[in-house]
Amino acid sequence: MARTLWLALLLGGAVGVLAGVYLEAVHLTEQLIWDGTDPRLPGDGAWQVVLVCAAGGLLVGVLRLRHDRDTPNDLEDALLELDDALGEDRKPPPKASWLIRATVLGVVSLAFGASLGPEAPLIAIATGFGDRIGRILRVSRAEAALITSSGAISGLFGGPLAAVALPLERGRAAATSTRLIGAGLVAGLAGLVTMLLVLPERAGGRYVLPYADPGSGRDLVESIGWAAAGAVPAACAGLLLLLGTEPVRRTAERLVPSTVLRAAAGGLVLGVCGAVEGLSLFSGEHEGQELIDSAGDKAATAFLLIALLKVVATLACLGTGWFGGQIFPSVFIGMATALAVTAVWDSAPVGAVVAAGAGAAATAVLRRPLATVLILLFFFPFGAVLPLAVGAGVGALVSGLSPDRRTPPRR
């Protein structure tokens, strides 16, 4: 056990550095292409956004020519691969060339404006790296997978608790996962520290909410009621994203058999959404604050339109081979949908409703309420924990309407 903990400390720290370098590569590439949500192209016009996103789709398609059958498409696929590793499913480790291509595919997808987050590539790459390094260090596949995944995503989600809860909640290998919680926490803490050394700006990046302490008694009950009212439509929006992913993917494969043209078509749809509303581009992590700041300035229909465009942009990316995760887009969609409630009823507390909407939509997509709350506590003020929990509860009830995805892609 002591050896496992020492390996968790060292390997988790090393993977945290690699994750920080990966996120920085995404950021630098993105800055070469974009100035905010405007492409760095001569001239002016909405056509530039469409052109850049379509070009990104072509690059994604070219990379997918080698990856179309053996790379996860989204976060759920990546978590299923990780669950296989935790269950000691026997299969050969990925080649170094696979890890390189998966890294490049993630960087290109995110840097060209995909409405996706970096968590899926990080988990997939970390799991593959753990497969290879575990054989060298003579540790089990489960130990290597949990250590590397926890170290990689701890900084992204603000700490080891969220990093461990995400793959373990709803996991199949309960006994193995429980035994390795200590190693996962150590690796997550080491990964968080080393990632912050590479990316110190990730510390303290919380949303600023117009949040007032509801106190107790009647005010607290009213705040919970408003949180639930905002969580219901947000959870439905998240469920729409979840249930639409596979049908859109199957339809895209049937209508556009070519891998390259299919990814380019997804880029065209993404670009059109971005031309209509710039907030529909990128993951939504940083765009969420701009959305919150617009509370009181937009009508309910404007917020619902933003949420709809974000759903369409995210489905276009997920359905055509762009590589990324759904956590940040679902949070953004939930906040936009919940803000429509505050636009209709002025008495609704914006902070509580927005937090509940984020928790509801993310839980409806992830179907992991505990992990959702732990993740969002890194991005929301701690005083928002109650509406986050209310939203996660509503999202968990709504997510019960969705089927599980059982079979991950095989290498």
Image: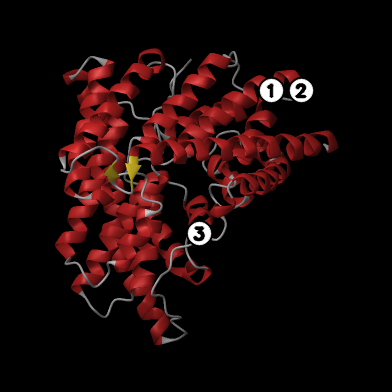
Labelled disc at residue 314: none
CB under 8 Å between discs 1 and 2: yes
Residue at label 2?
Answer: 137
Residue at label 1?
Answer: 133
Q: Residues within 10 Å of mark 3 (few under 14, many from 20)?
A: few
Kind of residue indicated by mark 3: Gly
Mark pair 3, 1: CA separation: 32 Å
Q: Position of residue 71 (x, y in %)?
A: 44, 22
Kind of residue indicated by mark 1: Ile
Q: Position of residue 173 (x, y in %)?
A: 60, 33
Residue at label 3?
Answer: 205
Q: Which colour assignment does the render follow?
A: secondary structure
Q: Which image quadrant: the N terminus?
A: top right
Could you tell me which secondary element the residue under label 1 belongs to?
A: helix
Counting residues from the N terminus, which is met first, the one under dot 2 or under dot 3? 2
Q: Is residue 12 above or below residue 138?
A: below
Counting residues from the N terminus, which is met first, the one under dot 3 or under dot 1? 1
Q: Is residue 5 above or below residue 284?
A: above
